[in-house]
Image (spheres, rainbow, N blue to C red):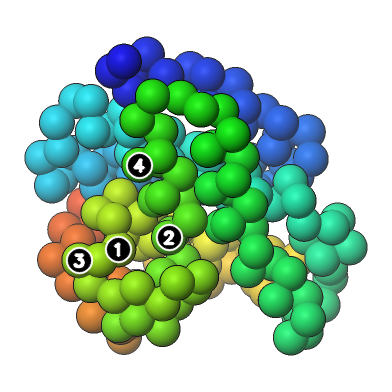
Amino acid sequence: MPFNKLLPGFKGLSRALMHKDHTTYQHSARVEKLAQALGEAVALEVDDLAALRMVACLHDIGKIGIPDTILNKPTKLDANDWKLMHTHSEKGEDIILSLELYHCDIIATAVRHHHEYFDGTGYPDKLNGDDIHYFARIISIVDSYDAMTFSRPYEKARTHTETMDVMHAEEGIKSDPYLFTKFARLIEHNSLKAD
Ligand SMILES: [Fe+2]
């Protein structure tokens, strides 16, 4: 089944996140838009773009399984909080696999790996480079941009310039350098570019 036929169902499932954690739902909607823009910039085919959007809208669906006391904690998270928070990518994979949809193991894998780092220091599997699914490498970049340019309970928003400085420093460490170069170019003309 083509992924664009499955996309509406995934967007419907993302509404579960809206009722649990509106901030993460809105973040996911912006990540979907930015992921689509980056996917188009690297000339993904139509069906791959639909698959990428499915990963984007459910990349944080596993946060349904994270306690509100951690999601909404007004102070910095401690080591135990982070340990629990880091389980959201595996929980997301589990939720998507449970749908038992044809070919959706690719989507589930990309969700599992959206916090892997290009140098192998991310989580949960410490994969590096091309071993991280292409979709996950795309989501990682747009996720970072959106997370930094919108305020979180424990951290205020950075400007576009501040965010890009951080992301440039993380090029090849956290992000895929080729994809980051494409992103740095497109964000200058994207409506989701921060002030
Ligand atoms: Fe995440």
Q: Position of residue 58 (x, y in %)?
A: 53, 40
What kind of element bears circle 4? Answer: helix
User: How busy is the neighbourhood of tag 2: few (under 14 within 10 Å), some, or many (20 plus)?
Assistant: many
Q: Position of residue 183 (x, y in %)?
A: 23, 58
Q: Which residue is mark 3?
A: 130
Q: CA distance from mark 2 to mark 1?
A: 7 Å
What kind of element bears circle 1? Answer: loop
Q: In this rendered view, identify the residue nearer to me: 163 or 94.
A: 94
Q: Amino acid at mark 4?
A: Ile
Q: Amino acid at mark 2?
A: His
- Cβ of mark 2 under 8 A from ligand 1: no
Q: Which residue is mark 1?
A: 132
Q: CA distance from mark 3 to mark 2?
A: 12 Å
What kind of element bears circle 2? Answer: loop
As drawn, 56 above or below 81:
above
- Residue 12 in sight: yes
Q: Which residue is mark 2?
A: 113
User: How busy is the neighbourhood of tag 4: few (under 14 within 10 Å), some, or many (20 plus)?
Assistant: some
